[in-house]
Amino acid sequence: MIMTMVQAINQALAGELQRDERIVILGEDVGRDGGVFRATEGLFEKFGPERVMDTPLAESGAIGAAIGMAALGLRPVPEIQFMGFIYPAFNQIVSHVARLRNRTRGRFTAPLTIRTPYGAGVKALEHHSESTEALFCQIPGLTVVAPSSPYEAKGLLIASIRSDDPVIFLEPTKLYRAEKQEVPEEAYELPLRKAAVVREGRDLTIIAWGAMIPVAREAAASAEADGVSVEIVDLRTLSPMDRETFLDSVKKTGRAIVLHEAPKTCGLGAEIAATIGESALLSLNAPVARVTAPDITVPLPKSEDLYYPSAERVLRAIRKLMEY
Amino acid sequence: MIERFDPLKGERLRILDDEGRAAPDLDPGLADAELRTLYERMVRTRAADAKALKLQRQGRFGTYASSLGHEAAQVGLASAMAREDWFFPYFRDLGAFLTLGYPLADYYHFWMGNEAGMRTPDGLNIFPISIPVGSQVPQAVGAGIAIKHRKLGAAVVTTFGDGATSEGDFHEGLNFAGVFGTPNVFVCVNNQFAISVPRSRQSAAPTLAQKAVAYGFPGVQVDGNDALAVFAAAREALATARAGGGPTLIEAYTYRMGDHTTSDDAARYRTKEEVQEWERRDPLARFRLYLGHKKLWDEAYEKDVQAAASEFVEKAVAEAEARPQASVDDVFAYTYSSIPPDLERQMAELKASLPEGRR
């Protein structure tokens, strides 16, 4: 069936609720309203208020409650309405969700799948365009996932819900309805902790994820006209990171660009560049480049174009590396 | 009984007076053996706590938060709980842990600096102690939600100090509990201090129990140095919770007799006179008087109880200290459900740098 990413997510959630009665969705507006992006549309009607719970407006309370629910055998799938509002729950995520397995030596775990829309590019209000994945990738115990298409979203979300580890599932707001794609009706899993080569090329590797994949594709298509063959690695799981896939690619192409919409400093690009430096230095024909947002606060919509990495910026980086 | 003591009117539930006489209309009617068990649990708690402080001074223990003065609150509460109930503790809960059957050797092992001590034995419904203040409150509410969903008929107890009532998680948790009508019993052990900051700096409200009113369920302040009062309030709140009657907030009004932890010096912020005033209200001494009036206490009994407590404690120390140090595998194994390749490499690199005996 041809569908958008938000429909694929909705289908994944519906299927999982049907499959496993321990699964409970909770959050703000996830129930009767079906979510502000309609990701949970129709689920409240189908599964009832105990399986699809509208909670009071309190992110820490919701994630904290999800931990207790998980300890008593439920499989909560909380939604944080926007990544910019996840910070009140940060303490629960970092101090408890991520480390419950470790601090109880496995007696208790918190295998939550925390879904949250992230990223800029939709001209939203202040605090609605955050891409702060690096904050979570630093925390041992968390799995951080970001899908880049409807097909990927369904398979990765199902795998996340079925995983025994807590997952921060970052849904790129910009891609919710940007493209439609053939997505199988039935449930399927895409592997966590595994990156994918989504475009093959010979001369240069772009490493990206989520909403940056279409930007990378656009830049790659333009580069093709210049005679440059670009390979794209979709990281998919940002942490724990699959380093082999992009290292193999870079060893082949000899050039790498990391592309992310988070600010540059201490972004995941730094980790990826360091990994390439550690493990593929002698394969490089040019320094690793980073195309990222600048180290500034996400501007309001009228200036969003000054922040969001464009295909044009990526293309310039490609040319620079090719001329190095 | 709880509704007879309105925190908005400054009323506090107390059953034992200073001389250890029980108010007849409030006495929970425990059998003689049960009363002695309550007392023996408090003695054991105090002995285990004193030993922990001693071990800390000898360098055999990490930083430790003493439970001195909290024995009635902890033991009275936990004695009212049933085996199927859940407990979400804070970091000053030794008496409750012991009463619920948590092995003292494990508890010591944790405070000696090893996570393995916080692996609750199977069959005990005890969550690990929560160090970030108040963060256990919404978790306990989530457990309550799960109990409702799964129709388990159990209750959830969570404890925290007076300082925690200033945390957002306290308010979010109680608010969720009110909205969802969860089977929770919230127990604020108001010991008058959050490290150095006095109770008056946590809230302008005359009692902490009255905060429950704003969340739409009952709150009661009890004398936290009165084991019978804590037990009676907890028993009633637990029965209400298990029967689907919703949450209750209990404020156990007590005093932290020791420093906040072994890294603190309470003499910097409170007077000797204040501490002496509270020494007169010692929960064990008052309960001893009560047992004496009932002819359940004499010197010989006391000697036996102290000897048993001492033996219990020494055995636990020996057991905890005999346990091996955590290995590299131990500290890596529980980060994820399975070790990612990256972490395997980090483990190998670490092991290579360690002497043979530490790998």
Image (cartoon, rainbow, N blue to C red):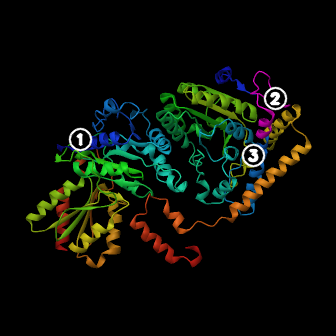
Do marks 3 and 1 both belong to one polypeptide chain?
Answer: no
Q: Position of residue B154 (x, y in %)?
A: 57, 35
Separation (CA) of disc 2 from disc 3: 20 Å
Q: Nearer the viewer, residue B128 or B199?
A: B128
- Chain letter behind tag 3: B
Q: Secondary structure at mark 1?
A: helix
On whether residue A73 falls in the magenta region, the answer is no
Secondary-structure class at tag 2? loop
Residue for badge 2: B17
Other-residue count near label 2 (Cα within 10 Å), few / some / many at <14 / 14–19 / ≥20: some
Q: Nearer the viewer, residue B327 or B165?
A: B327
- Proximity of marks 3 and 1: CB atoms separated by less than 8 Å: no
Does residue A120 appear left or right of residue A27 in this picture? Answer: left
User: CA gap, disc 2 to disc 1?
Assistant: 66 Å
Identify the amino acid type marked 3.
Leu
Q: Amino acid at mark 2?
A: Asp
User: Which numbered circle lies on residue B68?
Assistant: 3
Check contact, mark 2 vs mark 3: CB within 8 A: no
Magenta region, residue range: B15-38
Q: For residue A307, say whether it is visible.
A: no
Residue A311 placement (x, y as % from top left): 18, 57
Which of the marked residues, 2 or 3, is nearer the chain's N terminus? Answer: 2
Count of marks overlaid on the render: 3
Q: Can you give x and y, in whole percent of width and height, for residue A256 in the image? A: 24, 68
The quadrant of the image that shows the N terminus of chain B is top right
Q: Residues within 10 Å of mark 3 (few under 14, many from 20)?
A: many
| Residue at x 47%, y 51% (from the top left corner) | A94
The residue labelled by disc 1 is A7
Q: Residue at x 63, y 67 (%)?
A: B324
Relative horizontal placement of residue A144, taking residue B82 as reference (left or right): left
Callout 3: SS? loop
